[in-house]
């Protein structure tokens, strides 16, 4: 395990990488109007966001399994390189088609960054601290959701939209160098049978459906050969995907999960939440910049209430769930709030005040936050151990897919209605000859050159198009409201109470069941009572009559086989003289041998340390009730390994000796 400065450098590099991937889900939103003005392609605007979401979401499970199989360091470096190449190409794009294609490449690398960062934290951080550090990485998602729109606007105002992508290059290179120099890959490998065909098919039908919703009624009539062909193709690909997933040894998304009502409902609600969240993030900056004439930077500032509401509600509901054990009430309250907020957004126009818009944004964020964290908790609390990783990934997967569809559907409604409004204005002769509505998106000052009456009609046409977008979203949110009433609440398993804000706030991940339980148990161990109390309790259960300080030293020596006395005292945060009485007890009992300052474990000492480990295993197994760890070799091995790794660690040693018995 890396220590000190090396660990700090690794964690810093990992957080930078996570920040890059998370930012690129939101940073583009406030730059979109300017990008469209520069590159054209208003009808394809939504694909700048959708391409990234689809490729990152679909590739995530592949990155996770390839990292297990071939080693995470190399795969992580590869994902950074792909992400940086995609970022550079995005910045160099000269057409909307190029930008969309390069965003897909960028998303491919971003999917690897998100899943491999979490896995590497488990490799380099001691078990007791993993819950805390992975919680910090979850907070990165929250920070990125707040900073993304703000940074995107700032770059557009002060540099150019190209820097929304170029900024990734120096930061990514720093992360790449730090990982290459400091991170040493663990030797552990896990063989997988990777579901390549299932991944290709799920990407295929997702893209076909999104293209259908994007092009229908804009590029082609709904009854055209192209749209019907996409619909038929999507149905065929879905049928093939179902067939392949039934036969796959390790399917990308096990189909039997859909037979569980909690998973199906949570996935459906998550789809709607992603639909509303990413749709709002994409089109609200357009409304603010064009209709209200604010700068890209200020449009990001205007969105801060939404992000603050999301963070407060998500983190607050997670904390309350951990304390009370009840979770069903939050989506029941949250989804109607989302529906009401979307309806209120549909009433905004060119005369809406900043204060009234901020309240609407805050309400939408608060409603989203009440739902996002709970869906993961409900699923983790319901499914059997074997499906824990797939179910956790599945819920966040559907939220991301919902975001892709939401952006595409909102984009279609917006483009259709805006075109209709502009056609009507042109028919009435109210637009000057040669005036380009798309150019006005990137440069709202062009609107100021219009005559006052024409300017008012133009702004109203834009506001009306975006009002329609949010009005269409209201019935979808109401469907989620109905679905939440069918969710069943069961007593909350302790591992589900170890909330993970990375899953609640961020993108899809691909953890195995073992990784998910290890994260939750590590967090629970960290939150256990003081070490002094733990060792007293464990010693009593194991029938070991030793002071806590001696038990800690015994477990530490057993882990290492032998250790210099001075090094052991340093780990405990005491002097050799202060620690000597505890070691004397072990030597007198024949559990440890002392020779020339070196402390070595004896056979009796190892047997006693094993009894202490098993006593802790028995206590920790209570947290896994319902999964029968005694019947699962993998769970039993995980429990034993975690207890061995945490008993005798440095943190406990300092705690024990700080309260000397």
Image (cartoon, helix red, strand yellow):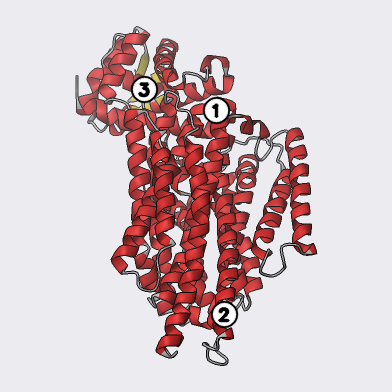
Looking at the rendered structure, which numbered label has been put on residue 424? 2
Task: Using the rendered view, name the quadrant where residue 364 is placed.
Answer: bottom left
- Locate residue 209: give its quadrant: bottom right
Residue bearing the label numbered 1: 383
Along the viewing direction, whichever of 298 and 229 lies nearer the viewer: 229
Disc 2/disc 1 C-alpha distance (Å): 54 Å
- Which of disc 1 and disc 2 is earlier in sequence? 1
Residue 656 in picture, x, y percent from top left: 25, 25
Q: Which residue is mark 3?
A: 599
Which element carries disc 2, helix, strand or loop? helix
651 in relation to 291, above or below: above
Q: Quadrant of the N terminus?
A: top left
Label 1: element kind: loop
Q: Nearer the viewer, mark 2 or mark 3?
A: 2
Q: Position of residue 370 (x, y in %)?
A: 39, 43
Looking at the image, the residue that sits furthest to the front is: 428
Q: Does the residue at mark 1 contact the one at mark 3 (Cβ under 8 Å)?
A: no
Q: Is residue 545 left or right of residue 620?
A: left
Report the disc number at residue 142.
Answer: none
Left or right: 417, with 561 as reference point = right
Which residue is at a point 43% across and 41% down the rendered structure image? 373
First reached walking from the N terminus: tag 2 or tag 3: 2
The answer to whether residue 566 is seen in the rendering is no
Q: How many angstroms separate mark 2 from mark 3 (CA)?
A: 88 Å
Whichever of callouts 1 and 3 sits on the residue coming sooner in the sequence is: 1
């Amino acid at each position: 395990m890396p220590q000190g400065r090396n660990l700090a450098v690794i964690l810093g590099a990992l957080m930078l990488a996570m920040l890059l991937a998370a930012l690129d889900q939101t940073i583009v939103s406030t730059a979109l109007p300017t990008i469209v003005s520069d590159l054209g392609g208003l009808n394809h605007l939504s694909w700048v966001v959708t391409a990234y979401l689809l490729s990152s979401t679909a590739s995530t499970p592949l990155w996770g399994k390839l990292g297990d199989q071939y080693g995470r360091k190399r795969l992580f470096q590869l994902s950074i390189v792909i992400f940086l190449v995609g970022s550079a190409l995005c910045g160099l794009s000269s057409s909307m088609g190029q930008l969309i294609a390069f965003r897909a490449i960028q998303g491919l690398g971003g999917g690897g960054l998100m899943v491999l960062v979490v896995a590497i934290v488990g490799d380099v951080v001691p078990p007791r601290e993993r819950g805390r550090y992975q919680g910090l990485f979850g907070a990165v998602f929250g920070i990125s959701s707040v900073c993304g729109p703000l940074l995107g606007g700032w770059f557009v105002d002060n540099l150019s939209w190209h820097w929304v992508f170029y900024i990734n290059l120096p930061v990514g290179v720093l992360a790449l160098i730090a990982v290459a120099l400091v991170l040493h890959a663990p030797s552990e490998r896990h063989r997988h049978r990777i579901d390549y065909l299932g991944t290709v098919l799920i990407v295929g039908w997702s893209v076909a459906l999104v293209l259908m919703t994007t092009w229908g009624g804009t590029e082609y009539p709904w009854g055209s050969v192209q749209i019907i062909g996409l619909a038929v193709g999507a149905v065929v690909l879905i049928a093939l995907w179902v067939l392949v997933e039934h036969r796959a040894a390790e399917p990308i998304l096990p189909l039997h999960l859909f037979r569980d009502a909690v998973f199906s409902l949570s996935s459906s609600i998550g789809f709607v939440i992603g639909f509303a969240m990413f749709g709002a993030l994409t089109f609200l900056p357009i409304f603010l910049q064009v209709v209200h004439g604010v700068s890209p930077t200020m449009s990001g500032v205007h969105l801060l209430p939404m992000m603050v509401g999301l963070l407060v509600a998500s983190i607050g509901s997670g904390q309350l769930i951990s304390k009370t054990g009840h979770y069903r009430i939050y989506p029941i309250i949250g989804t109607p709030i989302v529906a009401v907020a979307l309806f209120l957004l549909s009433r905004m126009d060119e005369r809406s005040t900043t204060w009234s818009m901020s309240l609407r944004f805050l309400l939408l964020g608060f409603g989203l936050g009440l739902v996002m964290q709970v869906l993961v908790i409900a699923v983790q609390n319901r499914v059997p151990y074997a499906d824990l990783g797939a179910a956790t990934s599945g819920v966040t997967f559907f939220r991301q897919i919902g975001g892709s569809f939401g952006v595409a559907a909102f984009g279609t409604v917006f483009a259709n209605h805006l075109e209709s409004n502009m056609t009507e204005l042109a028919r009435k002769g109210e637009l000057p000859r040669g005036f380009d509505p798309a150019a006005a998106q990137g440069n709202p000052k062009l609107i100021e050159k219009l005559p006052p009456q024409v300017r008012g009609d133009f702004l109203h046409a834009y506001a009306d198009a975006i009002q329609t977008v949010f009005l269409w979203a209201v019935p979808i949110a109401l469907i989620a409201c109905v679905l939440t009433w069918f969710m069943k609440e069961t007593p909350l398993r302790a591992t589900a109470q170890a909330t993970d804000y990375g899953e609640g706030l961020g993108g899809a991940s691909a953890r195995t069941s073992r990784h998910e339980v290890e994260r939750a148990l590590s967090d629970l161990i960290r939150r256990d009572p003081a070490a002094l109390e733990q060792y007293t309790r464990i010693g009593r259960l194991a029938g070991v009559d030793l002071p806590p300080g001696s038990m800690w030293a015994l477990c530490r020596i057993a882990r290492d086989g032998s250790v210099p006395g001075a090094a052991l005292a340093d780990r405990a945060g005491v002097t050799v003289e202060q620690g000597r009485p505890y070691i004397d007890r072990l030597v007198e009992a024949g559990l440890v041998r002392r020779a020339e300052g070196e402390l070595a474990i004896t056979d009796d000492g190892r047997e006693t340390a094993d009894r202490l480990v098993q006593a802790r295993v028995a206590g920790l197994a209570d947290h896994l009730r319902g999964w029968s760890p005694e019947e699962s070799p993998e769970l039993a091995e995980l429990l034993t390994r975690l207890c061995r790794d945490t008993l005798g660690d440095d943190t406990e040693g300092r705690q024990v000796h700080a309260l000397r018995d």
